[in-house]
Image (tube, rainbow, N blue to C red):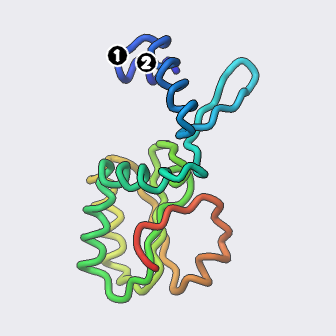
Amino acid sequence: MRGFAQEFDESTNSVRIELGKLHEAGLIVAEQDGQRVLYRPNIQNPFYRELCGLVSKHMGFDQLIERVLDQVGELEAMYVVGDYARGLDTGTVEVVIVGEVDSDYFERLTKRAQEELDRKVMIRVFEDEASFRTQGHENVLKLIGE
């Protein structure tokens, strides 16, 4: 909470009140961890996907996706997995691309994505959806694909 208070230049009490409102609205889940309360997005909330879309736009994922679509050959799907899919900004964005990607382009894309998002970006490519599914990712946010 102190981190939010410092980042937004607000008191910890103000942050606590706002987190309480988000919790009451069902947008976040609160879990007691000893003396601390841990907050995370409520992925069961019907607005979760909409909010992820807004965050994706804010983070610049939409521009990244457009660039990928312009350059990639046979793209079946694109996902954000891991912490960002859970709504946690840990500084590393994990992206999964399903389809055929030129290896030179893949390297340039990773570099450019890191610069544009100002985050470490890890991109993995799978030839097909079945190969991706065998990895067992629990937190998946589908950006494109059916």
- Residue at image mark 1: 9
Helix or strand or loop: what does disc 1 sit on?
loop
Q: Give the residue type that dot 2 points to.
A: Ala
The CA span between labels 2 and 1 is: 6 Å
Q: Which residue is drawn at 55% across and 24% down?
A: 20
Q: Give the residue type that dot 1 points to.
A: Asp
Q: How crowded is mark 2: few (under 14 residues within 10 Å), some or many (20 or more)?
A: some
Out of 46 and 3, give the one closest to the viewer. Answer: 46
Out of 143 and 83, give the one closest to the viewer. Answer: 143
Q: Residue at x 72, y 17 (%)?
A: 35
Residue at the far right in the pictured view: 34
**Relative to 81, is 93 on the left or the right?**
left
> In which image quadrant can residue 114 be found?
bottom left
Q: Residue at x 47, y 19 (%)?
A: 15
Vertical placement of residue 97 versus 76, above or below: above
Q: Residue 5 carries which label?
A: 2
Vertical placement of residue 99 versus 135, above or below: below
Q: What x and y, as percent, mark residue 129? A: 56, 82
Q: How crowded is mark 1: few (under 14 residues within 10 Å), some or many (20 or more)?
A: few
Q: Which residue is drawn at 29% across and 61% down?
A: 62
Q: What x and y, as percent, mark residue 122? A: 46, 61
